[in-house]
Amino acid sequence: MGAEKKGSKHKKVYIDKVLKLLDTYQKVLIVSSNNISSKQIQIIRKALLKKAVVLMGKNSLIRRACKMYAEKNPKVNDLIPLIKQNIGLVFTNEDPRTIRDIIVENKINAPAKAGTIAPNDVIVPKGDTGLEPTQTTFLQALDIQTRIAKRQIEILYDVKLVSEGEKVGSSEATLLSKLGIKPFVYGMKLVRVYDNGSVYGPEVLDITDEMLKKNVLEELGNVSGISLELGFPTQVSLPYSFMNNFRNLLAISIETGYEIKEAESIRELLENPEALKELMEKQNEEEKDEKEEEKEEEPEPESESESDDDMFGGGLFD
């Protein structure tokens, strides 16, 4: 009976902790914690100090806490389906991209254990192994070509020992351990982002402001083109419509001789070919000067001789 009360007390404390986190933070990064050790979790917690809080625990208790909090904020209901399998929650009010980058940086190399699924190909490089000649039979059993050089085993060619997605065998794990190779890199992997009721994938974090601006401008250009083609005025096409109509008005004025103030300067240029020629030459010179200025602003690569002089503090005979 006492153990049950103690367990219930721990569950209540944990649920209260989750409720407090949901009340404090607007964003939650859902991360996969497969093959993550408790030591690595502590390293990530330390790296995220004052920026985010990492929560690990039973999914059932986290879901229960979320359902309780959803009575106050229904948006949290969108978070509940994401709490499944081996995951952790990272609560933050910072830019999710910053938190994601910190998590990604904190990966560690790990040895290959027998029975684990390889997340990537495992290559054993050619060269000296440091193993004694008595181990030759063990390597030959794995179909690895070797020779004896300087009283140790030397592998002749790079060998793909395990392919991605394959299960690591006991012999492969033993060999990698003997060679001191830790072929796998493990870390938390971002699965989803919950942002105040919105849920999106990790790929969204790679979208920059420049990319958004470019896409918006391209779409506005498409809308403007369609509007002009259909003759249907929109806010983005009106400036082009006014410009095209004004050009038509100028052309009619020049062609018919009907004078309007805006066409006077154009008519003067057409009546004075020399002035038109001078204006075109002036524009060409200005464009040429702008290109030369842009070229001068580009840094020139240092020559080898200049680099050497800088390295040794001067020329050979200075």
Image (cartoon, helix red, strand yellow):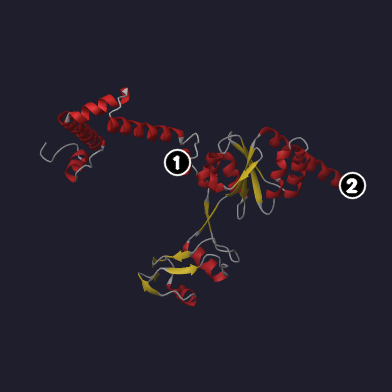
- Residue at the disc numbered 1: 228
Q: Residues within 10 Å of mark 2 (few under 14, many from 20)?
A: few
Q: Earlier in the sequence, mark 2 or mark 1?
A: 2
Amino acid type, label 2: Met
Q: Residue at x 53, y 49 (%)?
A: 107
- Residue at the disc numbered 2: 1
Q: Quadrant of residue 29?
A: top right
Q: Percent x, y for residue 229?
A: 45, 44
| Disc 2/disc 1 C-alpha distance (Å) | 79 Å
Amino acid type, label 1: Leu
Decide which of 222, 214 is in the foreground and name it: 222
Q: Residues within 10 Å of mark 1 (few under 14, many from 20)?
A: some
Q: Is residue 37 above or below residue 262?
A: below
Q: Do the residues bearing badges 2 and 1 touch, measured as CB atoms within 8 Å?
A: no
Closer to us: mark 2 or mark 1?
Answer: 1
Q: Is residue 177 above or below residue 255?
A: below
